[in-house]
Amino acid sequence: MIYRFSALFALLAPIAAQADAPEVVDATARESGSGWQISVTIRHPDTGWDHYADGWEVLDTDGNRLGFRELLHPHETEQPFTRSLGGVAIPDGAESVEIRARCSVDGWNDATYTLRLPN
């Protein structure tokens, strides 16, 4: 019986851990001055200072960081929430960027959100 429980736990643990990963549910981009303004909407079950979405980044299609927005406090009563980052330098000719979010406990979510850039 203990073996069955252990085996079940081993199978479900990665699913449970991933369930708390911050999720990018929407994003927009607009050219602004010499760069781009990126607005990102994140959903995460923030519980307070002990566990909250604490940042997101913009990546080119090769995985190079183009911008980072640190989130300085939990948003447990504001879900999902949107924050922006200006001055993001996106290479000429880029058609899309990738965005991924991070939380204070689980780190970076491996899943990325593809944001197609307006023409």
Image (cartoon, rainbow, N blue to C red):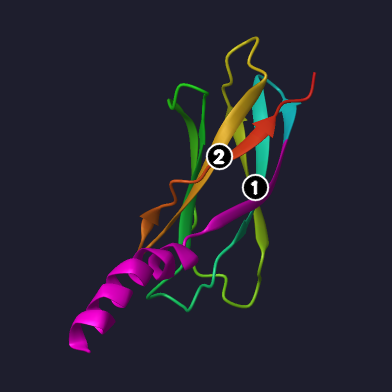
> How far from the left and from the top, in percent, is residue 72?
47, 60
Residue 16 painted magenta: yes
Name the residue: 19% across, 81% down.
3
The quarter of the picture where residue 105 lies is bottom left
Q: Can residue 15 be seen in this view?
A: yes
> How far from the left and from the top, in percent, is residue 94?
63, 16
* Foreground label between 2 and 1: 2
Chief secondary structure of the magenta portion: helix
Taking 91 as reference, is 85 above or below it?
below
> How far from the left and from the top, in percent, is residue 71?
49, 56
Q: Which mark is residue 99?
A: 2
Name the residue: 19% across, 87% down.
2
Q: What residue type is labelled 1?
A: Val
Residues 39 and 32: in front is 39
Question: Residue placed farthest to the top in the image?
Answer: 93
Name the residue: 54% across, 72% down.
45
Tell me which numbered mark, 2 or 1, is placed earlier along the sequence.
1
Magenta span covers which residues? 1-28
Q: Is residue 55 left or right of residue 28?
A: left
Residue at which label 1 appears? 40
The quarter of the picture where residue 28 lies is top right
Q: In this view, does 66 lie to the left or right of 12?
A: right
The Cα atoms of the two marked residues, 2 and 1, are separated by 8 Å
Q: Which amino acid does label 2 sit on?
A: Ile
**Quick check: marks 2 and 1 in contact, CB under 8 Å?**
yes
Taking 16 as reference, is 32 above or below it?
above
Label 1: state its secondary structure. strand
Residue 40 painted magenta: no
